[in-house]
Image (cartoon, rainbow, N blue to C red):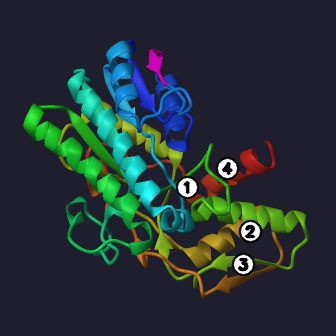
Amino acid sequence: MELESKIYVAGHNGMVGSAILRALTAKGYSNFIYKSSKELDLTNQEAVKAFFSEEKPEYVFLAAAKVGGIEANNTYRGQFLYENLMIQNNVIHQSYVHGVKKLLFLASSCIYPKFSQQPIKEDYLLTGVLEPTNEPYAIAKIAGVKLCENYNRQYGCDFISVMPTNLYGPNDNYDLKNSHVLPALLRKFHEAKLNNNKNVEVWGTGSPKREFLYVDDLADASLHLMRTYAGNISVNVGTGVDISIKDLAELIKDIVGFNGDIIWNIDKPDGTPRKLLDVSLVESLGWSHQVDLKDGISKVYSQKFLNK
């Protein structure tokens, strides 16, 4: 990508899209195209076709998606499958039709099998059953990965996929019904502190282990891969280090300064037992994460809840 290249960031208002915009701007790129979901419905085939025909982007970062945590994924199953399939199909296909030089598709580590060997290598994809609670979302993302791969094979496109681990950072979703575990815990402990509550309830047993990546690190990796990588392997992007939900809750409790107790609701689902990505490929390509988990959470908490 040249600094003057015309770049379309799909999903620029979301956590990932906004981080990619920040990273691009910091590197000196300035020729951006983006539309809010109200301005352009990416599930509408004709609207997306007209947009690409008019704007003719040279590079595309596909960060737009319907996302959420365990409850949202399990509740809006049809919606998650349909909307993500439509967004991906429309943007990827029109990128091919209109001669986009390169596209980067943001997938998700939830597309790997529920009981995958750890750490998870890129070639473990489609080797086992998925986690039932987010199966529709995962199937949509797998379809997006395979669409990129096979447009490369059939049409000679340069479309790559990135497989980020669990993300957190600026512009995250803090809705307790639709958010992921880390922002939900931040909000729960913060509100419990403000209300002088004696305890905070957390779903599950606390035993599952998760890996968390600060979203600006993902954006940096995305730019690095856009400039340096071409291929059909969907590249894992993460820290290579995980933490139990129990230890995460204790860490967030400490950062927030909540002095009460944690109550574990074992009637609620745990989800996948462990999900740690093997990041040896992306590291061999010259990238590694920079933001430590404690530092990242502290930064997010300060910005979001303390307005610092």
Q: Quadrant of residue 219?
A: top left
Image quadrant holding the N terminus, namely top left
Mark 1, residues whose alpha carbon is within 10 Å: few (<14), some, or many (≥20)? few
Vertical placement of residue 157 versus 112, above or below: above
State which region is magenta.
30-34
- Label 3, secondary structure: give it: strand
Is mark 3 in CB contact (under 8 Å) with mark 1? no
| Residues at marks 1 and 2, CA–CA distance in whole angstroms | 16 Å
Which mark, by number, is residue 292?
A: 1
- Decide which of tag 4 and tag 2 comes sooner along the chain: 2
Q: Quadrant of residue 125?
A: bottom left
Closer to the eye: label 4 or 3: 3
Closer to the eye: label 1 or 4: 4
**Quick check: can you spot residue 164?**
no
Vertical placement of residue 263 versus 16, above or below: below
- Label 1, secondary structure: give it: loop
- The verdict on residue 33 being magenta is yes
Give whichever of 265, 227 is nearer the camera: 265
Q: Quadrant of residue 62?
A: top left
| Residues at marks 1 and 4, CA–CA distance in whole angstroms | 12 Å
Three-letter amino acid code at the position of disc 1: Asp
Disc 4 target residue: 300
Disc 2 target residue: 254
| Left or right, residue 83 beside residue 255 | left
- Decide which of tag 4 and tag 3 comes sooner along the chain: 3
| Residues at marks 3 and 2, CA–CA distance in whole angstroms | 16 Å
Disc 3 target residue: 201
